[in-house]
Image (tube, rainbow, N blue to C red):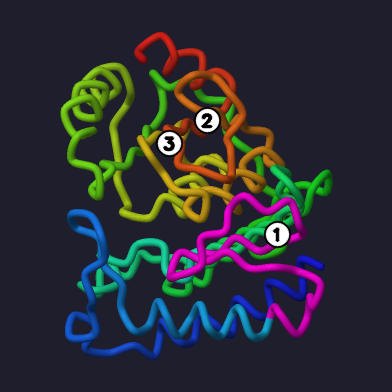
């Protein structure tokens, strides 16, 4: 199952790599700093078509136009280009994120960064992998590690709270980083390069695949309130190893 999804996602990555003049292909969406390009639409259409042929029983939820998140049917939750602003400016850190979901349970997840040719994948109860090699979260504490964060750019009402928390994390940790792709940052925690990622008000398509990859790598995915992440509405999220999570919660 996962191998077939990977095959399709890697082909979709060629659309991203072939892109040119991205800034002239942009449409603004609802919300501040929220954009879509013709390449987001093209990647999503390709994924819907190819995955639909491979998994005809599945429904589809995508960032660009399809938002029926309440279904309990077998469904794909897709972000065709996570990190659209990066993509627009050729910053070369954007990912395709594809999750296969039953109810509120993710059973397969793939995150692909075509610029680095890194493909992160997981199938429920079968572990997490980077380019076919098993991965796991680190055992480092947050005080000895790196923290990743998102700025909720579409929701400026969260800015002050985010940066107040970030200052605490910066003072406590080894350092902080921001890639501009939540899906990629979650995978950085999953493969042990960083210890925690947090952001307020992320959508299901931002986190669905990464949640399975992170938990299958031994990490913990929670909302700020300490609840299980829900894939039918936005959530304030934390992804971390156990040690870093305990420290982060003290700061939170």
Q: Is residue 86 magenta?
A: no
Earlier in the chain: of badge 3 and badge 1, it is: 1
Quickly name the residue at label 1: 100
Quickly name the residue at label 2: 240
Circle 2 residues within 10 Å: few <14, some 14–19, many ≥20: many
Q: Is residue 64 magenta?
A: yes
Viewer-closest of 86 and 177: 86
The spot of residue 84 in percent (x, y) is 32, 67
Circle 1 residues within 10 Å: few <14, some 14–19, many ≥20: many
Marks 2 and 1, Cα distance to the nearest angstrom?
Answer: 22 Å
Q: Quadrant of the C terminus?
A: top left
Mark 2 or mark 1: which is in front?
Answer: 1
Residue 131, placed above or below residue 205: below
Provide the secondary structure element on which disc 3 rests.
strand
Mark 3 or mark 1: which is in front?
Answer: 1
Marks 3 and 1, Cα distance to the nearest angstrom?
Answer: 22 Å
Provide the secondary structure element on which disc 1 rests.
strand
Give the magenta-colored segment's residue range: 51-78
Q: Residue placed at 26% from the left, 41% from the top?
A: 151
Residue 251, placed above or below residue 190: above
The spot of residue 119 in percent (x, y) is 59, 65
Quickly name the residue at label 3: 197
Residue 65, placed above or below residue 251: below
The spot of residue 160 in percent (x, y) is 16, 28
Q: Is residue 224 left or right of residue 32?
A: right
Earlier in the chain: of badge 3 and badge 2, it is: 3
Q: Are marks 3 and 2 in contact (CB under 8 Å)?
A: yes
Earlier in the chain: of badge 2 and badge 1, it is: 1
Q: Residue placed at 58% from the left, 53% from the top?
A: 69
């Amino acid at each position: 199952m996962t191998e077939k999804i990977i095959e399709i996602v890697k082909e979709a990555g060629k659309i991203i790599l072939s892109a040119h003049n991205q800034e002239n292909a942009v449409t603004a969406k609802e919300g501040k700093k929220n954009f879509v390009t013709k390449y987001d639409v093209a990647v999503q259409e390709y994924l819907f078509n190819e995955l639909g042929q491979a998994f005809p029983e599945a429904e589809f939820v995508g960032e660009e136009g399809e938002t029926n998140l309440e279904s309990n049917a077998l469904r794909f939750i897709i972000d065709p280009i996570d990190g659209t602003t990066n993509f627009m400016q050729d910053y070369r850190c954007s990912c395709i994120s594809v999750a296969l979901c039953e109810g509120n349970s993710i059973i397969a997840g793939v995150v692909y960064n075509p610029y680095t040719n890194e493909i992160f994948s997981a199938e429920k109860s079968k572990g997490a992998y980077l380019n076919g090699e098993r991965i796991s979260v680190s055992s480092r504490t947050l005080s000895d590690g790196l923290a990743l964060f998102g700025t909720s750019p579409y929701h400026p009402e969260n800015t002050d709270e985010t940066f107040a928390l970030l200052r605490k994390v910066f003072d406590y940790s080894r350092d902080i980083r921001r890639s501009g792709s939540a899906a990629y940052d979650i995978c950085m925690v999953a493969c042990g390069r960083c210890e925690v990622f947090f952001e307020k008000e992320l959508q299901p398509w931002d986190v669905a695949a990464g949640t399975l990859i992170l938990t299958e790598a031994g990490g913990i995915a929670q909302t700020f309130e300490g609840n299980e992440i829900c894939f039918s509405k936005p959530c304030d999220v934390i992804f971390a190893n156990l040690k870093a999570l305990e420290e982060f919660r003290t700061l939170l």
